């Protein structure tokens, strides 16, 4: 079926219709025109194939040649992905920038460029971990290479392979050198996988452990599970990107796949420049050593944007299969949805809601459901996970639009970004009464941090809810009508909002807050509330309580060094208690 | 504008003319996206572009409009290649129309090279992160929404609001170091603005003595609508040449993008495409991105492109698709407020919805001043509280406020009248920050929650001197 050439019949933006491609199958890759532009068959109708082209189609004409590759869109997997940036179809952008193509030398992306995802020349020190004669199946470990100081990259028997090991390599090998001979078949480190097909696992597990992010509003109030999914919708300027970047920096994942899907070029440049200089709080290694960027910025071809989330997901699954906890951050799924819409529009398909194709929800579901905590293929009991965090950019910050609504149906955690909070520079602008998490992670926190963690969390959520209720009364009648205990709710609610939930992504100390410090900060606030309530009941003056000097210390908790959090909290609490005593 | 190749094939097979589009039948060899010459019955030649090829039919958008074209005798010459602009150092100080022809009476400048006007996407791995502070002299921008070189920042204006004045002021006052003044140029693209507005810009460039360092592309309100789709691309092609091949720092002013978007909608409607929100095409985000993303810096190159985009929010609605999609692409926004304008605040910048995403990388010790980030956060926090109280007062009256509340309320007032309001005189960044400390006067150290004690100790009081 290879090599059968078709002819272009129609060109409309990124969509090309061709006839005469014999043996064409849905999602097969084709090369279009003299430049060999890469495209993917997305619809077949008789002899006609509809192709979405991953590069600009300018200059194509009726009659241009279409070459059938016979294979679907594949991504190359193996050592050499970490610390790199790829476009939506897996082309290495740093290598392209160095390759001298493009308009003013190298900085612009030309068309038809072909550079493989993985560096063919690079040699890796391969350490075999099995011996000749062993019988292996898919997912079994053949050996490992130290890809970066942060990650030992396991080389596995690829899905579908298996048998007796006839030979095993060792030493400095390239990704295409065979590392093993299994039933006579050479296996190399480089593997390929069709991006639209989920990689197989032994079985799925219940997500019962949080992805710790060091972000207080996330970990304390609305945590996401490892292997779970979260959606973060917000209008422009509400901090989606800063939040995604904070997660990419601080989440306790072994590997982070960051997909810049239809977003700003400068933001990706920032990540590229900043991450190598930052240290992973867990390993001390450079953050770049655990990060893979997929960059298909808004001005890059729209069809490749559609492919980018699948490329990123496949890479995430590949590391999951090695037993890694992977965080996949997609910014933004709306731009991906719009890419679907644009292509669908060019196909003149009957539109569903707001012009999006009727298959938008099923495509979104396919994506989110590739998240999961799993028992990996293979003999050893490796457990891996892919946690998905999808940003959504709702038009006009209106959450009733389709991408937000469908994402809400699928994701287990909802971080609602609020325009009003962002305008008053309350960051992260995650709203405390509109957000939620469906993961039951309380037992984990109770066991691993403090046994009353969940109890504190509930208390904080209830108090914030009560504050919001009282707020609506105050808006109408003024603060005078509130009883002293209710005024205390206001006072403490403000502490929770301003001194706990607000967190500066740009402050060296505050950017990452370990769980123990989060616990102690909330502990101080709750203790202050309880003691102040008691003092009020015993007749203390509300105004005096509000102006106690020790209370000002609550606002400074965020700058405590994490290791001093407990002692600092105990000391601050006793000062507050003592001053309250005096106030009586 | 110049052509790459001679037009070779000519067709007299126009099947239909509809809106800005012309449908050509029986064609072979039409290339997608190529430019064509449309010869009107009276012999006039108009430039067009192929929007779609479908078997033996081609859909052509005619930049200068289709008035007077007919089916019988209009002919089309194919083979123009992709739309290109001749670029060269001789463009500086010149004025062109919306399709790149000189309109200042001079001859076309000698082109050093031809450049495809659509440009190519910049490889994110080749970009350099913008971090050089641009001092505009406007406190509300420098202090709270700092602009950096290589940023794209729109001004969300409204009809009757001084968006153009603010842009002109920034173009005239934006301070660069003396050594770099030579390398600072402005590329100005007028998109459907009036003669009056265009004259205002020209005069303002003249007054600041920078006309010789300006390239102007003018598509005015009475010029062909569809030509507007081309004009910003010409301007950015010129800008990319000046920035990345000549090492200049280029400030590109695009005004008014609302007119551009309306032209885009007109073409989309004529093609009977499925409309998105408010009738704008579903691909408007992508289309706008191909314009706005042509800003930035490139590693190991000297020049930069900074974009200042003016758009009018229809009915002052920030959720309208034009400002909305723009805000999702640009690195922040400066929002003008009718309320402040009516209050006489000049420039009427509402800082709460305004934002500069690249601010953090452009400020701080060594760039502006060590206290900048925290002072800005504190100004925001106090002003937001004051604005909330203002709303409350309109419901329950000022008498219900506590003494504390009143201080916040009067801070909001002072902030608008002294910090934001700044007619004429440019303010250096140090003066802007000192003024902020002055405004913090009525608040105790403890109330300045956003500022750490060290910063307070170092800068409070020092400013009062």
Image (cartoon, coloured by chain):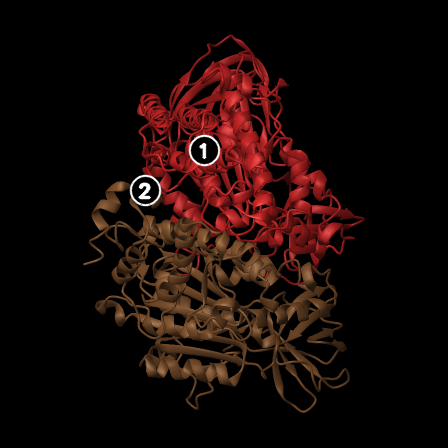
Farthest-out residue, front: A539
The picture places residue B305, in percent across and down from the top left corner, at: 39, 64
Residue A379 seen anywhere in this rendered image of the structure: yes
Q: Is residue A316 above or below residue A91?
A: above
- Disc sitting over residue A215 in the figure: 1
| Relative side of A90 to A575, left or right | right
Marks 1 and 2 belong to one chain: no
Q: Quadrant of residue A194?
A: top right
The picture places residue A173, in percent across and down from the top left corner, at: 40, 26
Callout 2: residue from which chain?
B
Q: Kindly indicate whether the residue at mark 2 contacts the one at mark 1 (C-beta within 8 angstroms).
A: no
Which colour is chain A painted? red
Residue A96 seen anywhere in this rendered image of the structure: no
Which colour is chain B painted? brown
Q: Is residue A18 above or below residue A26?
A: below
**Judging from the image, what secondary structure is the residue with disc 2 in?**
helix
Which residue bears the numbered disc 2?
A: B446
Q: Quadrant of residue A103?
A: bottom left
A52 vs A355, nearest the viewer:
A355
- Disc sitting over residue A518 in the figure: none
Looking at the figure, which quarter contains the C terminus of chain B? bottom left
Q: Residue at x 75, y 56 (%)?
A: A348
**Judging from the image, what secondary structure is the residue with disc 1 in?**
loop
Closer to the observer: label 1 or label 2?
2
Callout 1: residue from which chain?
A
How far is the residue under mark 1 from the one under mark 2?
25 Å
B276 vs A311, nearest the viewer:
B276
Q: Is residue B223 above or below residue A240?
A: below
């Amino acid at each position: 079926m290879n090599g059968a050439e078709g002819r272009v019949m129609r060109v409309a933006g990124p969509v090309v219709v061709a006839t005469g491609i014999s043996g064409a199958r849905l999602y097969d890759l084709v090369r279009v025109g003299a430049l060999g532009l890469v495209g993917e068959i997305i619809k077949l109708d008789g002899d006609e194939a509809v192709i979405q082209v991953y590069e600009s189609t300018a200059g194509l004409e009726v009659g241009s040649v279409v070459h059938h590759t016979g294979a679907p869109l594949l991504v190359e997997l193996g050592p050499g992905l970490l610390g790199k940036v790829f476009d939506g179809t897996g082309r290495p952008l740093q290598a392209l920038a160095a390759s001298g193509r493009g308009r003013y030398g190298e900085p612009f992306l030309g068309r038809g460029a072909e550079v493989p995802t993985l560096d063919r020349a690079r040699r890796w020190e391969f350490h075999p971990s099995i011996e000749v004669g062993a019988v292996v199946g898919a997912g079994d470990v053949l050996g490992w290479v130290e890809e970066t100081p942060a990650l030992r990259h396991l080389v596995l028997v690829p899905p579908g392979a298996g048998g007796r090991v006839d030979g095993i390599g060792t030493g400095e090998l390239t990704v295409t050198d065979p590392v093993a001979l299994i039933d006579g078949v050479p296996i190399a480190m480089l593997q390929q996988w069709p991006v639209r097909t989920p990689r197989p696992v032994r079985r799925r597990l219940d997500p019962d452990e949080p992805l710790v992010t060091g972000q207080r509003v996330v970990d304390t109030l609305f945590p996401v599970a490892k292997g779970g999914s979260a959606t973060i919708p917000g209008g422009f300027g509400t901090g989606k990107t800063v939040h995604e970047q904070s997660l990419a920096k601080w989440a306790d994942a072994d590997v982070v796949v960051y997909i810049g899907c239809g977003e700003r070029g400068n933001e990706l440049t920032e990540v590229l420049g900043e991450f190598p200089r930052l240290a992973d709080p867990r390993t001390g290694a450079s953050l770049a050593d655990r990060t893979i960027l997929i960059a298909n910025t808004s001005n890059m071809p729209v069809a490749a944007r559609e492919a980018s989330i699948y490329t990123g997901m496949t890479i995430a699954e590949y590391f999951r299969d090695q037993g890694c906890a992977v965080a996949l951050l997609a910014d933004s799924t709306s731009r991906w949805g719009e890419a679907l819409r644009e292509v669908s529009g060019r196909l003149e398909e009957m539109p569903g809601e707001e012009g999006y194709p009727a298959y938008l929800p099923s495509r979104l579901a396919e994506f989110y459901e590739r998240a999961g905590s799993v028992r990996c293929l293979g003999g050893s009991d490796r457990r891996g996970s892919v946690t998905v965090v999808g940003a959504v950019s709702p038009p006009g910050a209106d959450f009733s639009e389709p991408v937000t609504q469908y994402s809400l149906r699928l994701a287990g955690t909802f971080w609602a970004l609020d325009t009003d909070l962002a305008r008053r520079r309350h960051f992260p602008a995650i709203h405390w009464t509109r957000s939620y998490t469906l993961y039951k992670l309380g037992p984990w926190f109770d066991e691993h941090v403090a046994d009353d963690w969940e109890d504190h969390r509930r208390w904080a959520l209830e108090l914030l809810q009560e504050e919001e209720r009282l707020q609506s009364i105050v808006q109408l009648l003024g603060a005078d009508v509130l009883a002293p205990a209710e005024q205390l709710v206001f006072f403490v609610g403000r502490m929770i909002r301003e001194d706990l939930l607000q967190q500066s992504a740009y402050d060296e100390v505050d950017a990452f807050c370990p769980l123990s410090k989060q616990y102690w900060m909330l502990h101080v606030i709750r203790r202050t509330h309880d003691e102040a309530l008691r003092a009020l009941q015993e007749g203390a003056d509300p105004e005096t309580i509000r102006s106690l000097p020790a209370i000002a210390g609550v606002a400074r908790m965020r700058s405590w060094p994490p290791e001093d959090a407990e002692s600092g909290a105990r000391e601050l609490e006793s000062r507050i208690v003592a001053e309250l005593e005096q106030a009586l | 504008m110049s052509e790459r190749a001679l037009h070779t094939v000519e067709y007299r097979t126009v099947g239909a003319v509809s809106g800005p589009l012309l449908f050509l039948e029986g064609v072979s060899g039409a290339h997608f996206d190529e430019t064509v010459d449309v010869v009107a019955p009276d012999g006039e030649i108009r430039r067009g572009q192929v929007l779609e090829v479908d078997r033996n039919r081609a859909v052509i958008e005619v930049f200068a409009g289709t008035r007077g074209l007919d089916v019988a005798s209009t002919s089309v010459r194919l083979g123009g290649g992709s739309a290109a602009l001749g670029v060269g150092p001789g463009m500086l100080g010149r004025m062109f129309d919306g399709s790149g022809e000189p309109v200042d009476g001079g001859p076309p400048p000698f082109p050093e090279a031809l450049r495809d006007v659509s440009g190519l996407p910049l490889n994110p791995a080749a970009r350099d992160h913008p971090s050089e502070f641009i001092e505009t002299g406007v406190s509300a921008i420098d202090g709270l929404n700092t602009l950096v070189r290589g940023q794209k920042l729109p001004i969300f204006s409204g009809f009757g609001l001084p968006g153009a004045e603010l842009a002109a002021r920034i173009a005239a006052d934006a301070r660069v170091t003396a050594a770099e003044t030579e390398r600072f140029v402005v590329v100005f693209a007028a998109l459907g603005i009036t003669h009056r507005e265009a004259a205002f810009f020209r005069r303002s460039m003249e007054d600041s003595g920078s006309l010789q360092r300006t390239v102007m592309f003018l598509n005015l309100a009475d010029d062909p609508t569809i030509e507007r789709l081309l004009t910003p691309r010409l301007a950015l092609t010129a800008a990319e040449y000046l920035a990345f091949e000549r090492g200049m720092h280029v400030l590109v002013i695009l005004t008014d993008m609302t007119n551009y978007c309306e032209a885009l909608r007109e073409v989309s409607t004529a093609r009977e495409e499925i409309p998105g929100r408010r009738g704008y095409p579903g691909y408007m985000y992508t289309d706008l991105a191909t314009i706005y993303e042509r800003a930035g810096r490139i590693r190991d190159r000297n020049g930069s492109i900074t974009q200042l985009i003016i758009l009018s929010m229809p009915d002052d609605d920030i959720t309208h698709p034009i400002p909305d999609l723009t805000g999702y692409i640009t690195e922040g926004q400066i929002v003008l407020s009718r309320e402040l304008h009516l209050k006489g605040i000049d420039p009427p910048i509402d800082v709460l919805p305004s934002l500069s995403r690249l601010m953090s990388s452009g400020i701080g010790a060594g760039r502006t001043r060590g206290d900048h980030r925290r002072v800005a956060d504190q100004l925001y926090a106090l002003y937001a509280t004051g604005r909330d109280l203002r709303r409350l007062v309109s419901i329950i009256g000022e008498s219900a406020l506590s003494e504390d509340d009143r201080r916040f309320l009067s801070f909001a007032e002072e902030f608008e009248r002294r910090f934001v309001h700044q007619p004429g005189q440019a303010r250096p960044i140090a003066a802007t920050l000192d003024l902020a400390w002055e405004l913090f006067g009525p608040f105790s150290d403890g109330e300045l929650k956003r500022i750490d004690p060290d910063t307070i100790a170092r800068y409070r009081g020092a400013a009062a001197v």
